[in-house]
Image (cartoon, coloured by chain):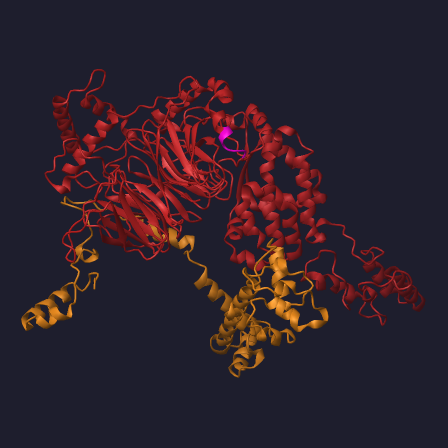
Amino acid sequence: MSGPAPPPGGPLSRSNSLGGPQNAGLAGTPTIPPQGSQGPGPPAGPGSQQNLNQIVLEYLNKKGYAKTESMLRRESAHQDPEGKPVFQKLEEEGGNKYFRSFNLIKGWVLDDNLEIYKGELLRLLWPTFAYCLLDLVADYYPRDAEKFFETYHEMFTREHSEDLRALSRITLPEHIQASEIAKLYRNNKYRLSITMMAFHSLLQFLESHLEEGGKIIMNIMQSHMNIMTIDRAKASSEYSISAMLHRGSTEQEMPAEDEGIPGHHPGSANTSLNAPEVLPKVQLGPAQRESDLMEDVRADLEKEDAKNPPVAGRNTLVEELEKTIKREPDDDTPNRDAVPLPPSTQRDVMMEVQKIKENRDRFPIPGRTGGVGPGVSVVMHTFHNTFDSINCIEFSGDLKLVAVGTSESYIRIWSIDGSPLPSAPTSTNPNPPPSASKRLIGHSAPVYALSFAPSTSEPDPTPLDSPANATSPRVLLSSSADKSIRLWSLDTWTCLVAYKGHDAPIWDLSWGPFGYYFASASHDRTARLWSSDHIAPLRIFAGHDGDVDCLAWHPNGSYLVTGSNDKTVRLWDVARGTPVRLFTGHTAFVTAVAVAPSGRLLASADEGGAIILWDLSSGRRLKRLRGHAKGGVWSLAWSVESSVLVSAGADHTVRVWDVLMQTPDSISAQPGSGAAGGKASADATTAGAGAVGKVGDAAPGGAGAGGQKKTKGKDVVVSSDQISVFPTKKSPVYKVEFTRMNLVMAGGVYLP
Amino acid sequence: MSSPAADAPTTNGINGTSTPTIAGATTPPNPNSQTNGSNPPDATPDTHNAPPLAMPTTSLDDPGTSRRPRDARLIHLILANLGVNAYQERVPLMLLDFAYRYTSGVLSDAMHISAEAAPTGPGNPRGGAGGVGGAGSTEGGVTLDAVRQAIASRLNHQFNATLPKEFQLDLAAERNRVALPKPEKEFGLRLPPERYCLTGVGWQMKEERMQGMSLRRQWVGRKRIARCGMREWKL
């Protein structure tokens, strides 16, 4: 204990340098340095600091060392009677300054502030907390950093639990270099939108409290944050007084769309600071098919119409076809040459014909009328005695097969109706016994995703001219933790090709809407586009900061949507491999995405149970559907009309949602920027406006309230646009799917 | 259970007094109670030790007054700090085993690095001194830089699965510059060129067939084998 005691909470490395000058100042004196007695417990009294100083000063005075005396007086002026340094400036307080600053702003935001600004200023606390913590660590105050985290992390656990977990381990500057999240925060600026008035009052407050900590906060805001001020008069309704008043009352806040580390204009995938506000145009219209194909389809439909004339009141098939290919404005249809497809075959024609037929004969789900949701039927398939080894469930497009991928590395396929599967004779067994299930063995690690090739059920009188024309799926893709994708033949039940290219386990996989192309999402933070006749990927979609967990194709096959661990959802242009939209707002890992058949809307779900609907063309959030408990929504599906969404997940329920209804959660997005806004988004807003009046009627007595009752006291608020909920018995639901005739197929596993 | 117990003495090498007791503890799976038994002065009532154990003992059985090795206590404190209040008694042993293996691995790596790979130039006098001294296996042979390097190399190969984002973006840009190839008309399933497929004929080697075969057939068979060299083999 010969050195000076470090200042309270002082940095470990600085204790010497702080004490240095004091020692130096007294170096010439032959007496004991006054600080020497600053032990752990010297009794106050004759040996105390002040007395010693006094004695020394008297001694110096007596001896006439005037210079030394004045020096000692000057040096000791910065110490209080106990010998501890007196801080005159905030900067000198060491780690404590961050505590003071954060306390200052927290107190102001939570209490001493106009209630109306509280909502948006609350958003300021998280980045301030994160950057205070990281600065503490970078300045080498490990103790203070730990204490800071302990003191304040409670208030952020709901929204930032993942980030907090990562930040809690960071206490030394070296950790910052090693930690992904710390690097992310320190190398990027946190973007935050605040209305002008709130920002001014914040600045005013900080300026008037510069010395109590305002300076630190200002510094953090300057160096680490990108605060966008919004003029309320010009901004969208999200920032209107009424919206803010309303939000003030709701407890559950969610981050704004442009907030966060990849700060960006809402929807825009360009995260640079001076990105243009205009979003790149996306062409969301239905794909333009080959003219040969359409002619063949029309001829076949005419033949079909002549053979089986429709019952009274039904459209003929040709009329149905006309309806589906109603000409969109040309600039909304993606160019067919950008993502070239192979020339169509007889199988394609038969599939198109069957699709038109099924579309006509489907169970129509009208938009919500009179507060009563459409009744949707769910066929639930439950797997028993699985011992939790099943990772994924997939139904084939012709609803004849169901496949599961297991953590024991094999794939098992059943025929849904229990009929024996066709099996080719092998050399060892020329006459295999009929069996309703098959095992596909080849992967060397757990199988995480499966995808049947696009297929439809066979046309009614099956024209079995050639097996190549059968509309059954014929091939199955699987992806696994062994980094490979395998293509399996469903005729011979063997593996045909192994596609390798990913660097890590592959989490998700999906065939494009017209076959030929497929996409995969992997732990290596990329999604990749493949075609079945190339063994190397054709496109690499890189840009996510975390695992890509799920993906979905846009129905026109020109865009791909991926959801990631970094809590963002991105829309990629398949032809160019560039991101065109970036959606932020999730507070947990994104676990499922699905694009509506209309091509205009996107649904994404996260681990926290929230589902968010997005408008693709304008890139804005439409609304949030709440009701699922924590644990993840694992599958989403849209009805044919794009008016009903079905979700299923770990909370053992299948839930049906009304897409068109507006709830207090929904944010009336501005109509799409430019012409790309298009028809369907206008549809959505007008239909939504029509539903506004009904919110009041539906909420108290409607199906939404019924759903709330069924959540069995879990503290989950169910938003009022839930139409119905189907609870299962201890069976998490892995997969839901709408058939082309609006029946819901669900697959789950009984896990007692 | 036996392997951690066997490793424990080396782990607790610092704690000289407890080492022999644990080394002797082979039969009952509770090193803690064994330590009790060997330290009669503060012996706690060893009621839980008497009956044969159906379940592995947990930390809850420990009244907290027993004497344990220092490292075991440290592990207990760390677990308690992380919110783990109850655990089986073999957990600390397993963790100690892991810690020992990790540190000894890092240290031996560091020794090799400082002995052979450390820069011995004049720019790095510490490393140079360590390098010279390390060859003689003195204790001063491991430098801080070498330890850092050892940890970093371990990190890279154990945890860092993903490539840096900039590299991925470059790679993606390069790959995405190529326009999507236009597929030609083709019949049947669209598969990659045959040599990349797993559709080759499965060859079966049967001793009796080989014996019965004429020389000529064997030769033909070998030629075909050579042609299918790229395919997957099913034996």
Q: Residue A736 in the image: state x and y as whole percent.
A: 36, 37
Left or right? Give the position of A124 relative to A261: right
Say above or below: A365 vs A352: above
Left or right? Give the position of A378 relative to A54: left
Q: Where's the N terminus of chain A, which quadrant?
A: bottom right
Q: Colour of chain B?
A: orange
Say above or below: A513 vs A673: below
Q: Residue A330 in the image: state x and y as whole percent.
A: 27, 28
Q: Residue A187 in the image: state x and y as whole percent.
A: 51, 50
Q: Which of A85 and B216 is in front in this view?
A: B216
Left or right? Give the position of A689 relative to B136: left
Q: Nearer the viewer, residue A299 or A68?
A: A299
Quadrant of the rendered image containing residue A367: top left
Q: Which of A673 and A644 is in front in this view?
A: A644
Q: Where's the C terminus of chain A, which quadrant?
A: top left
Residue depicted at x 58% and y 62%: B89
The residue range painted magenta reads A708-713
Residue depicted at x 38% and y 28%: A644
Left or right? Give the position of A265 relative to A475: right
Q: Residue A674 in the image: state x and y as whole percent.
A: 38, 28
Which chain is red in the picture?
Answer: A
Say above or below: B157 vs A562: below
> Is residue A740 inside the magenta stretch?
no
Residue depicted at x 24% and y 45%: A436
Q: Is residue B170 visible?
A: yes
> Is residue A710 inside the magenta stretch?
yes
